[in-house]
Image (cartoon, rainbow, N blue to C red):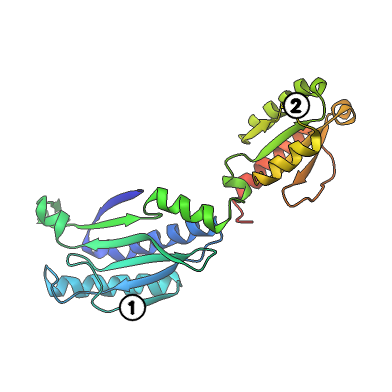
Amino acid sequence: TDDAHIFVRPDQIGVEIEALLGEVTEAYDWFGLRPRLTFGTRPDKALGDPAAWERAESLIREALERSGVDYRVKEKDGAFYAPKIDIQIEDALGREWQTATIQVDLVMLPERFDLTYVDENGEEQRPVAIHRAIYGSLERFIGVLTEHFAGAFPFWCAPVQAVVVPIADRHIEAATELAEVLRSRSIRVEVDESSNRMQNKIRLAQEQKVPYMLVLGDREIEARTAAPRTRAGEQQPPQDWDGLADRLKAEADARRPD
């Protein structure tokens, strides 16, 4: 998991929660996912000072409102040691998965490890521990993404972003050279050096949901160009190798969900 613990003064809870909500929103926007947030408040058997719970819940509510995110309150659904924000997402099949969580630990870590800090008056105070996971279990999140996109991942996170398809064996050397140009821009690319026919190579790449296929023959090599073909079958105009590599890098850096 991508767990982390952040230690803050009690008065810093709101600012830190707001920053974490921004991280969650950005992280899920990369995949085009719209998380659903629930705010769990103090349960009946909660540990710790009720006044501290009330202050923490008030700061969390204010952070949620300032962030402008949609959320609903689940009364008494917090952990016994922490008010919490849980994040759920819905996959392409309509199933809901809990992924992220933000918990404001008022008791467990600070008390168990006897954590203190020295305030501006030189006095020892007890901090608050904010436990957060943006994606939660990474294995589960990758599984959800795989089903959600049915394997057709957005370009920026596709395991293989492009396949170079040499028409004949004599084109393999140039195909390898083009692949190196793309790799110099951090594009994940493979060269299909198999003995399959060109159409079979293209069909295989489409079945594997590779975003771009780059066919190379005599004409393309002579002009040092490549015409990208998308996995949806769209044929794009030819482009010189360096220009194509720069365009694909910009597309990857943009992290668009489509």
| Residue at left offset 88%, top offset 29% | 223
Frontmost residue, 66 versus 21: 21
Up the image or down, 138 lies above or below 60; here it is above
| Foreground of the two, 40 or 54 | 40
Q: Which residue type does callout 2 highlight?
A: Ser
Name the disc covering residue 73, or none. Answer: 1
As drawn, the label of residue 195 is 2
In the rendered structure, the answer to whether residue 122 lies left or right of residue 14 reads left
Residue 235, position as x, y percentages in the image: 82, 47
Residue at 70 percent of width and 40 percent of height: 204
Percent x, y for residue 170? 82, 20
User: Looking at the picture, how far across and down is residue 97, in whole percent?
Assistant: 41, 63
Mark 2 touches mark 1? (CB < 8 Å): no
Q: In which quarter of the image is the C terminus?
A: bottom right
Q: What residue type is labelled 1?
A: Val
Classify residue 257 by image quadrant: bottom right
Q: Which residue is drawn at 45% across and 74% down?
A: 70
Distance of label 2 from label 1 (alpha carbons):
60 Å
Q: Is residue 28 above or below residue 173?
A: below
Residue nearest the viewer, comparing 150 with 87 = 150
Residue 197 % position (x, y): 80, 32
